[in-house]
Image (cartoon, rainbow, N blue to C red):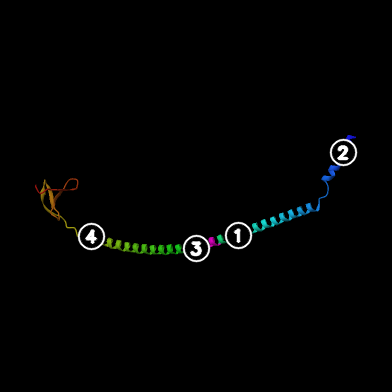
Amino acid sequence: MKKILVLCLLFVFSTSFYAQETKAKKKAKTEKAAEAKEKAKAKKEAAKEKKEKAEAKKEKAETKVKKATEKAEKKVEKAKEVTKKTTEKAADKTKKTTEKAKESATKKAAKVRETNEKAPRVADKVTGTYNGKKVYTGPRGGRYYINSNGNKTYISDDK
């Protein structure tokens, strides 16, 4: 019997747990849900605003980058033109200097030919004998004889 009584009490208390909610509780739950929805909407809107700001910053950065690249490209083109002009000037200068060098080289060669050409050779005069060999006197006054090897041997003025 005690067991039945305990079971009955348990049944009574268990039904109170599963009873329907009251209107006040339902209202509180709906209000909480509405607040949660509003908070979610506010968060979404804030996220959208942040996203829009980020996109605007990104667009500004892209335009700055484009402008910078355009300026850099213009500078590169100007530099190419300047280098092209300077190389052309340098090429012209080198051509002129090579032409001048060729002209001066040909003039020098002509002068060298003129200076290298010796006066007509005059045969040395036989002026006497020395140890049984003929003594020759050169155009500048040097005296020599031809030795057994065929070389000139000069005689000093002391002898």
Q: Looking at this rendering, what residue extends furthest in the left direction?
A: 158
Residue 100 in which image quadrant: bottom left
Label whose residue precedes the other's in the sequence (3 or 2) = 2
SS class of the residue under badge 1?
Answer: helix
Quadrant of the image containing the N terminus: top right
C-alpha distance separating marks 3 and 2? 91 Å
Q: Using the numbered discs, state the Cα–Cα distance from disc 3 to disc 1 in whole angstroms.
A: 27 Å
| Mark 3 or mark 1, whichever is nearer to me | 1
Mark-to-mark CA distance, 4 and 2? 147 Å
Disc 3 packing (10 Å; few <14; some 14–19; many ≥20): few
Residue carrying label 2: 7
Residue 88 screen position, x and y as percent:
41, 64
Image depth: mark 4 or mark 3 in front? 3
* Residue behind mark 4: 115
Q: Determine which quarter of the picture holds residue 47.
A: bottom right
The quadrant in which residue 101 appears is: bottom left
Instruction: State the image coordinates of residue 52 (x, y, percent, origin top left).
Output: 62, 60
- What percent of the width, then of the height, locates residue 42? 67, 57
Task: Give me the residue at 27% from left, 61% from top.
Answer: 108
For this view, does 13 lie left or right of residue 125? right
Q: Earlier in the sequence, mark 3 or mark 1?
A: 1
Residue range in magenta is: 63-68
Relative to the observer, which residue lies in front, 99 or 82?
Answer: 82
Amino acid at circle 4: Thr
Considering only order in the chain, which callout, 2 or 4, is on the residue closer to the N terminus? 2
Q: Which disc number belongs to residue 53?
A: 1
Q: Which residue is mark 3?
A: 71
What amino acid is labelled 3 in the image? Lys
